Image (cartoon, helix red, strand yellow):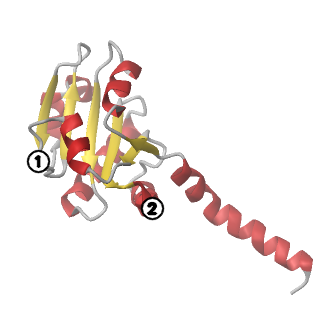
Protein backbone atom coordinates (compact mmCIF):
# COMPACT_ATOMS: atom_id res chain seq x y z
CA UNK A 1 0.00 0.00 0.00
CA UNK A 2 1.33 3.46 -0.86
CA UNK A 3 1.77 6.19 1.73
CA UNK A 4 -1.19 7.99 0.13
CA UNK A 5 -3.33 4.83 0.53
CA UNK A 6 -2.25 4.43 4.15
CA UNK A 7 -3.15 8.04 4.85
CA UNK A 8 -6.59 7.63 3.31
CA UNK A 9 -7.16 4.47 5.37
CA UNK A 10 -6.19 6.34 8.54
CA UNK A 11 -8.58 9.20 7.71
CA UNK A 12 -11.42 6.72 7.11
CA UNK A 13 -10.71 4.91 10.39
CA UNK A 14 -10.61 8.18 12.31
CA UNK A 15 -13.90 9.30 10.78
CA UNK A 16 -15.53 5.98 11.68
CA UNK A 17 -14.14 5.63 15.20
CA UNK A 18 -13.02 9.12 16.13
CA UNK A 19 -16.34 10.24 17.59
CA UNK A 20 -16.53 7.24 19.92
CA UNK A 21 -13.02 7.82 21.23
CA UNK A 22 -13.76 11.49 21.71
CA UNK A 23 -17.00 10.75 23.58
CA UNK A 24 -15.29 8.15 25.76
CA UNK A 25 -12.66 10.70 26.69
CA UNK A 26 -15.40 13.09 27.77
CA UNK A 27 -17.04 10.73 30.26
CA UNK A 28 -16.55 12.29 33.66
CA UNK A 29 -15.17 10.52 36.71
CA UNK A 30 -17.82 10.05 39.40
CA UNK A 31 -16.24 10.38 42.83
CA UNK A 32 -17.66 10.77 46.34
CA UNK A 33 -17.92 14.57 45.93
CA UNK A 34 -19.50 14.48 42.45
CA UNK A 35 -23.14 14.61 43.53
CA UNK A 36 -22.53 17.82 45.50
CA UNK A 37 -20.96 19.35 42.37
CA UNK A 38 -23.93 18.27 40.25
CA UNK A 39 -26.35 19.87 42.68
CA UNK A 40 -24.38 23.11 42.42
CA UNK A 41 -24.51 22.93 38.61
CA UNK A 42 -28.30 22.53 38.80
CA UNK A 43 -28.91 25.04 41.60
CA UNK A 44 -32.61 25.94 41.62
CA UNK A 45 -33.36 23.52 38.78
CA UNK A 46 -34.98 20.09 38.79
CA UNK A 47 -33.13 17.14 37.26
CA UNK A 48 -33.19 13.37 36.95
CA UNK A 49 -30.18 11.29 37.95
CA UNK A 50 -30.27 7.85 36.36
CA UNK A 51 -27.90 5.07 37.47
CA UNK A 52 -27.21 2.15 35.16
CA UNK A 53 -24.65 -0.53 34.30
CA UNK A 54 -23.26 -2.09 31.14
CA UNK A 55 -24.36 -5.61 32.13
CA UNK A 56 -27.80 -4.63 33.48
CA UNK A 57 -30.46 -5.72 30.97
CA UNK A 58 -33.33 -3.86 32.71
CA UNK A 59 -31.16 -0.73 32.47
CA UNK A 60 -31.21 -1.07 28.67
CA UNK A 61 -35.03 -0.93 28.69
CA UNK A 62 -34.87 2.28 30.71
CA UNK A 63 -32.08 3.77 28.57
CA UNK A 64 -34.20 3.18 25.47
CA UNK A 65 -37.11 5.14 27.01
CA UNK A 66 -34.80 7.93 28.22
CA UNK A 67 -33.29 8.17 24.74
CA UNK A 68 -36.79 8.61 23.26
CA UNK A 69 -37.54 11.35 25.80
CA UNK A 70 -34.29 13.17 25.04
CA UNK A 71 -35.04 13.05 21.29
CA UNK A 72 -38.52 14.50 21.92
CA UNK A 73 -37.31 17.05 24.45
CA UNK A 74 -33.57 17.80 24.21
CA UNK A 75 -33.77 20.13 27.23
CA UNK A 76 -34.99 17.37 29.55
CA UNK A 77 -32.52 17.59 32.49
CA UNK A 78 -31.07 14.09 32.54
CA UNK A 79 -27.77 13.01 34.07
CA UNK A 80 -26.45 9.48 33.63
CA UNK A 81 -24.09 7.66 35.97
CA UNK A 82 -22.75 4.24 35.07
CA UNK A 83 -21.82 2.18 38.10
CA UNK A 84 -19.16 0.44 36.03
CA UNK A 85 -15.47 1.26 36.43
CA UNK A 86 -14.28 4.20 34.32
CA UNK A 87 -11.96 1.78 32.50
CA UNK A 88 -15.04 0.38 30.71
CA UNK A 89 -15.99 3.74 29.20
CA UNK A 90 -15.58 2.58 25.58
CA UNK A 91 -18.25 -0.09 26.07
CA UNK A 92 -20.50 2.40 27.87
CA UNK A 93 -20.23 4.84 24.96
CA UNK A 94 -21.30 2.17 22.47
CA UNK A 95 -24.39 1.43 24.57
CA UNK A 96 -25.24 5.12 24.97
CA UNK A 97 -24.83 5.66 21.21
CA UNK A 98 -27.23 2.77 20.60
CA UNK A 99 -29.95 4.61 22.54
CA UNK A 100 -29.10 8.12 21.33
CA UNK A 101 -27.72 9.16 24.71
CA UNK A 102 -24.08 9.67 23.78
CA UNK A 103 -24.41 13.47 23.97
CA UNK A 104 -25.77 13.39 27.56
CA UNK A 105 -23.59 14.42 30.49
CA UNK A 106 -22.30 11.06 31.66
CA UNK A 107 -20.23 9.88 34.60
CA UNK A 108 -18.75 6.52 35.52
CA UNK A 109 -17.62 5.26 38.89
CA UNK A 110 -13.98 6.25 39.31
CA UNK A 111 -13.24 4.72 42.71
CA UNK A 112 -12.76 1.01 43.28
CA UNK A 113 -14.43 1.42 46.67
CA UNK A 114 -17.93 1.42 45.12
CA UNK A 115 -19.65 1.29 48.50
CA UNK A 116 -18.32 4.79 49.23
CA UNK A 117 -19.72 6.05 45.91
CA UNK A 118 -23.11 4.44 46.49
CA UNK A 119 -23.22 5.90 50.01
CA UNK A 120 -22.35 9.37 48.66
CA UNK A 121 -25.40 9.14 46.39
CA UNK A 122 -27.76 7.61 48.94
CA UNK A 123 -26.93 5.85 52.23
CA UNK A 124 -30.08 3.75 51.75
CA UNK A 125 -29.11 2.49 48.27
CA UNK A 126 -27.57 -0.97 48.15
CA UNK A 127 -26.67 -1.08 44.46
CA UNK A 128 -29.87 -2.32 42.80
CA UNK A 129 -30.24 -1.14 39.19
CA UNK A 130 -31.65 0.66 37.44
CA UNK A 131 -31.98 3.35 40.08
CA UNK A 132 -33.27 6.88 39.50
CA UNK A 133 -33.48 10.01 41.58
CA UNK A 134 -35.85 12.88 40.89
CA UNK A 135 -34.65 16.20 42.24
CA UNK A 136 -37.08 19.10 42.39
CA UNK A 137 -35.98 22.74 42.14
CA UNK A 138 -35.19 22.75 45.89
CA UNK A 139 -33.27 19.48 45.43
CA UNK A 140 -35.65 17.45 47.54
CA UNK A 141 -35.39 14.04 46.01
CA UNK A 142 -37.40 10.93 45.46
CA UNK A 143 -35.76 7.59 44.67
CA UNK A 144 -37.03 4.85 42.38
CA UNK A 145 -35.59 1.34 41.98
CA UNK A 146 -36.38 -0.76 38.92
CA UNK A 147 -37.38 0.07 35.38
CA UNK A 148 -39.22 3.34 35.07
CA UNK A 149 -42.34 3.59 33.01
CA UNK A 150 -43.23 6.82 31.27
CA UNK A 151 -46.22 7.13 33.62
CA UNK A 152 -43.99 6.84 36.68
CA UNK A 153 -41.61 9.39 35.22
CA UNK A 154 -44.48 11.80 34.63
CA UNK A 155 -45.74 11.27 38.19
CA UNK A 156 -42.33 11.59 39.86
CA UNK A 157 -40.94 14.32 37.63
CA UNK A 158 -43.79 16.57 36.42
CA UNK A 159 -41.76 18.37 33.72
CA UNK A 160 -41.70 15.02 31.88
CA UNK A 161 -45.49 15.27 31.60
CA UNK A 162 -44.96 17.87 28.89
CA UNK A 163 -43.29 15.26 26.67
Q: Residue at x 31, y 54 (%)?
A: 112
Q: How crowded is mark 2: few (under 14 residues within 10 Å), some or many (20 or more)?
A: some
Residue at the extreme left of the image, as rendered: 124
Q: Residue at x 47, y 61 (%)?
A: 90
Q: Name the residue under label 2.
A: 94
Tag shown at residue 5: none
Residue 41 at x, y = what percent? Answer: 41, 21
Left or right: where does residue 145 sit relative to residue 158? left
Q: Is residue 39 above or below residue 34?
A: above
Q: Which of 121 and 23 is in front in this view?
A: 121
Q: In which quarter of the image is the N terminus?
A: bottom right
Residue 97 sits in quarter: bottom left
Q: Which of 32 and 35 is in front in this view?
A: 32
Which mark is nearer the camera, 2 or 1?
Answer: 1
Question: Element type at marker 1?
Answer: loop
Estimate the spatial distance between the alpha carbons at disc 2 and disc 1, rounded to whole Å. Answer: 27 Å
Q: Residues within 10 Å of mark 1 (few under 14, many from 20)?
A: few
Instruction: Tally the numbered discs.
Output: 2
Q: Which residue is drawn at 23% across and 13% down?
A: 138
Residue at the extreme bottom of the image, as rendered: 1
Tag shown at residue 126: 1
Left or right: where does residue 31 sit relative to residue 158? right
Residue 71 at x, y = what percent? Answer: 41, 41
First of labels 2, 1 by sequence position? 2
Q: Which of 121 and 81 is in front in this view?
A: 121
Residue 136 at x, y = what percent? Answer: 22, 19
Q: In this view, does 14 lie above or below 64?
A: below
Q: In which quarter of the image is the C terminus?
A: top left
Question: Element type at marker 2?
Answer: helix
Amino acid sequence: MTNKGKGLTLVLLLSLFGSTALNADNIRHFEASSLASLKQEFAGQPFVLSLWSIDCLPCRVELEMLGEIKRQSPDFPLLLVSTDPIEQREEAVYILEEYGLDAIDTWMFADSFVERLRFSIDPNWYGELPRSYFYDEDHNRQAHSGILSREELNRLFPPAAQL
